[in-house]
Image (tube, rainbow, N blue to C red):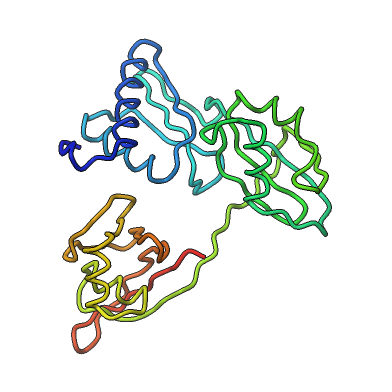
Amino acid sequence: MTDNASVSEEDKKLISRISDMTVLAERRGMVYSPFLNSRECAVAERELKRIVCKNYCFYGFFENAERKMLCIYEEYFRPENTDFPLKCLTFTFRKENVLTHRDFLGALMALRIKRETVGDIVINEGIAQIAVSDSVKDVIMSDIRKIGSVGVSVYDDCQTKLERTENFREIKGTVASMRLDGILSLALNVSRSKAVGIIKGIGAEINYFPKYECTCHLSQGDVFSVKGYGKFRLEEVSGITKKGRIHITVLKYC
């Protein structure tokens, strides 16, 4: 990240934190961050690659976790998942009660704990699991007896890990090229000229980094979003039509 003018204040603070972590890792052998969201993970990884730091890894307990801790370590250390300073708490409640991500997060924030100490929240029928920092585990276990009006029991036990699932709506179609404007036109079901106006006006994010150029190219697996329009993933590029257009599948996060 050499163009500081294009870096937000939040990103600058994170980059500074990454720099501090690399220094601490040299002294201690291993150092961990709080939970980072998907964008913060992307910023951190780009900065680590820029400074040619190869000894790092991310972990968030759940497979494909959105929120993860970063570990930077010296070459003679190799952290295991169990070394990360986090725990998974299991909450059980009556199956007839319906609790949401917002319900759990609200209850945790009411304890005045910081968002960076809470990882992914995975909910199933009558059960939920939350990855949390070691530093807040005891507070949560001792203070939470209800989520909203629903009584819950809390255990420091995750013998069976819940599967983190995401809901998508599938969008299929063809595009003239892999340019952002054409793919966004398909994803939003708007004309290409309107997609161009959106990109130049409010911008889009590709893999969590802002873009204002319509000519940006996407690759299979890229995540892209536009504020107010939603978040998408280019799931598949599957062939060429007789007229030379490209078959693609886009998933919209629901």
The answer to whether one can see residue 242 in this image is yes
**Residue 117 placement: quadrant:** top right
The answer to whether one can see residue 44 in this image is no
Please say if 161 is above or below 234: above
**Residue at the image position 36 percent from the left and 69 percent from the top:** 236
Which sits in the foreground, 15 or 75? 15
Q: Residue furthest top?
A: 27
Measured as percent of width and height from the top left, residue 152 is found at 80, 43
Q: Residue furthest bottom?
A: 242
**Residue 172 placement: quadrant:** bottom left
**Residue at the image position 37 percent from the left and 25 percent from the top:** 72
Relative to 13, 30 lies left or right: right
**Residue at the image position 19 percent from the left and 61 percent from the top:** 216
Please say if 2 is above or below 134: below
Which sits in the foreground, 145 or 69? 145
Relative to 88, 166 lies left or right: left
Measured as percent of width and height from the top left, residue 193 is found at 22, 77
Q: Residue furthest front?
A: 201
**Residue at the image position 30 percent from the left and 35 percent from the top:** 9
For the N terminus, the image quarter is top left
Measured as percent of width and height from the top left, residue 242 is found at 21, 89
